[in-house]
Amino acid sequence: KYKPMYFPAPAGYNKWMEKDHIEQPPVWCSVDLRDGNQALIIPMSLEEKIEFFKLLVDIGFKEIEVGFPAASETEYEFCRTLIERNLIPDDVTIQVLTQAREHIIKKTFEAIEGAKNVIVHLYNSTSVAQREQVFKKDKEHIIQIAVEGAELLQKLMEENGGKYRFEYSPESFTGTEMDFALEICNAVLDVWKPKKELPAIINLPATVSHSLPHVYASQIEFMSENLKYRDNVVLSVHPHNDRGTGVADTELAVLAGADRVEGTLFGNGERTGNVDIITLALNMYAHGVEPNLDFTDLPHIVKVYEKVTRMHVYERQPYAGKLVFAAFSGSHQDAIAKGMLWRETHDCDKWTVPYLPIDPKDLGREYEADVIRINSQSGKGGIGFLLEKTYGIRIPTKMREEVGYSVKDVSDHTHKELQPKEVLKVFNEKYVNIC
Ligand code: KIV
Ligand code: ZN
């Protein structure tokens, strides 16, 4: 019924298709405090933002977009608080978003005064839909807005004597003709003339995702191969998740040449969200590549995130959801128990336990509480594993089936999951006195 709203790269931009994994982590930039925050029902308070900022620093983010300081008093205040209270570690760069309008740019520069490492992120919208319907301006005008914004950034930086880095986003890139997207980015780069010691960032957002992941990746490859000053440009992507493919879009975009990724924890953000950086990083980890972000206590990260954003981490959220390592069914439990035993008795440099994509312990999760869960679907293997690991009770092989049925029966009648201590109770009541 509809014609597509995107503009694929010219034919031939798909060389990355031969690669089967990401070899190097991209530069990660968290946009939780800006894109994530602007999509919350109740935006974070100043104290909540500070707590979230500290969490992001602890995880290991070196680039953090802290807000759009000219957009609201809270955002301005937050930026000033970080700077004045010395809360930004020396190796962390804060990023601030600004539209390409004079008074907004000036206010943004006031907000960052005194900060050591800053990326000033300039954007204007470039898609056909926005040009025709919102701005009612032709392509030349849209380029002029971007170039004038870029010039003002350059001028204010020279006047301030600061050494800020600059980023430009053609917002709604995924609805923009590729040759126009290239023209406007190159026009901005011609103003900034990035050098090795001060590279510029060109950020290509899937503001709304419109295409299959490989189409977005081909667009990124096209831009990567045709941008001016490419050696001094960090090519960034900023995928949203409208088609539910934010992670795939990003992974392919990185294979296609992106150096940097903007996203959020658990994919919070406008509409269906920004891309989830945790999934991206842990997908890399599952491929044996160190992502340079620390998720060894994921339950703690979930706790802080849920508190300050008032959002809920979905039970099946990759890696982080309560149920993502859980096995209730007998055959899965049996395979996991056997896989764990096999691991204890074999020297193995790969993680191969069936049904578990990575070792849950690496994320601060427990086998007993998170993996083997007991209900009426469970089996003797899982129940035996749980009694042994939690209480040190090793059930003789011949008794296993009967114990399994006794425990399952209870769950069948109560229609409830049984906690480890309830499993122990059934076992004790039925067998301990006999022994
Ligand atoms: O999604 C988007 O296009 C943005 C820009 C401001 C980068 O958030
Ligand atoms: Zn965005």
Image (tube, rainbow, N blue to C red):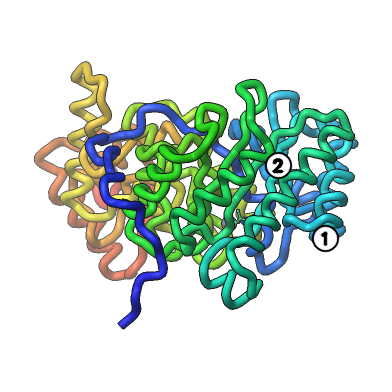
Judge from the rendering whether residue 143 lies leftward or rightward of residue 262; answer left or right.
right
Residue 282 visible (yes or no): no
Q: Position of residue 414 (x, y in %)?
A: 33, 69
Residue 20 visible (yes or no): yes
The residue that mark 1 highlights is: 72
Q: Residue at x 35, y 44 (%)?
A: 252
Instruction: Name the image quarter holding the N terminus.
Output: bottom left
Spot the residue most to the left.
398
Q: Nearer the viewer, residue 328 or 403?
A: 328
Q: Nearer the viewer, residue 263 or 378?
A: 263
Ligand 1 shows up in which quadrant of the image?
bottom right
Examine the rendered structure and indicate whether residue 53 appears above or below residue 178: above
Label 1 residue SS = loop
The residue that mark 2 highlights is: 95
* Residue 301 picture quarter: top right
Mark 1 closeness class: few <14, some 14–19, many ≥20 residues within 10 Å: few
Asked whether the residues under the numbered discs 1 and 2 touch, taking CB atoms below 8 Å apart as contact, a structural biologist would say no
Spot the residue most to the bottom.
1
Q: Position of residue 132 (x, y in %)?
A: 57, 75
Q: Amino acid at mark 2?
A: Gln
Judge from the rendering whether residue 129 lies leftward or rightward of residue 68; answer left or right.
left
Q: Residue at x 40, y 64 (%)?
A: 6
Instruction: Name the image quarter holding the C terminus.
Output: top left
Q: Residue at x 75, y 44 (%)?
A: 151
Mark 2 closeness class: few <14, some 14–19, many ≥20 residues within 10 Å: many
Q: Position of residue 296 (x, y in %)?
A: 50, 32
Q: Position of residue 210 (x, y in %)?
A: 41, 65
Label 2 residue SS = strand
Examine the rendered structure and indicate whether residue 41 appears above or below residue 395: below
Spot the residue most to the front.
140
Q: Nearer the viewer, residue 49 or 402?
A: 49
